[in-house]
Image: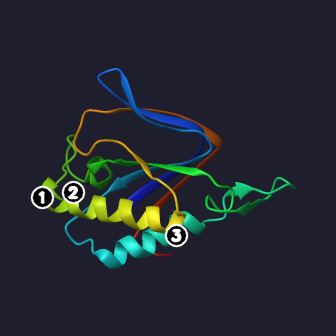
Amino acid sequence: MKAVLQRVSTAFVTIENEIIAAIKNGLLVLIGIEDADTTADINWLSNKIINLRIFDDDNHIPNLSVKETDGDILLVSQFTLHAQIKKGNRPSYIKASKPDKAISLYEELIHRLKNDLEKIIFTGKFGADMKVALVNDGPLTIIIDTKNKE
């Protein structure tokens, strides 16, 4: 799995000009799923997302996690995170999972995040043409690849 985490002061997803999900302070997480992903990837990634200390404490030092700040998570599927651009100018998405596999892993990640954060996880709509808007706080953006846990 590949994830792009963005610390946000606000983020929302629209479909056909209708807001379907919105958060204030928290994380916008874009998630890309590939066939090699497993429940172990989900468990590791959820733990990392929930516990990363990237929110400021009272001294303006990033010492707090999204859980400790009672922040929200907006999770949006994005198969293009697995784009391969080695050849030519048209990205290939061959590594991205097809919906039949990806949807179940996406839903499993939502469930795991919900249990770990102990609150609702806001989401986009899998496979839909979405518009995502955000105000990146910091800006702070982190890229995570469960296949490269360095």
Mark-to-mark CA distance, 2 and 3: 21 Å
Badge 3 density bin: few <14, some 14–19, many ≥20, Cα 10 Å: some
Apparent side of residue 51 relative to residue 91 in the rendered image (left or right): right
In the picture of the structure, the residue carrying the numbered disc 2 is 103
Where 21 falls versus 7 (above or below)? above
Vertical placement of residue 130 versus 84, above or below = above
Examine the rendered structure and indicate whether residue 70 appears above or below residue 43: above
Secondary structure beneath dot 3 equals helix
| In front of the other: 69 or 34 | 69
Question: Which of the two discs, 1 and 3, labels the residue nearer the N terminus?
Answer: 3
Instruction: Residue type at mark 3: give it.
Output: Lys
C-alpha separation, residue under disc 1 versus residue under disc 3: 26 Å
* Residue at 20% across, 44% down: 88
From the top left corner, tell me how far across and down residue 5 is, in percent: 50, 53
Residue lying furthest bottom in this view?
A: 40
Instruction: Tell which residue pokes out farthest to the right in this image.
Output: 59
Amino acid at pointer 1? Asp
The answer to whether residue 84 is seen in the rendering is yes
- What is the number of callouts on the image? 3
Q: What mark, if any, has residue 92 been given in the picture?
A: none
Residue found at x 33% / y 52% = 81
How many neighbours does mark 2 have within 10 angstroms: few (below 14), some (14-19), or many (20 or more)?
Answer: some
Disc 2, SS: helix
What mark, if any, has residue 48 been given in the picture?
Answer: 3
Q: Which of marks 2 and 3 is nearer the N terminus?
A: 3
Does 82 sit above or below residue 16?
below
Quarter of the image with the N terminus is bottom left
**In this figure, which colouring scheme has been used for the structure?**
rainbow
Q: Name the residue under label 1.
A: 100
Callout 2 touching callout 1 (CB < 8 Å): yes
Q: Do the residues labelled 2 and 3 touch (CB within 8 Å)?
A: no
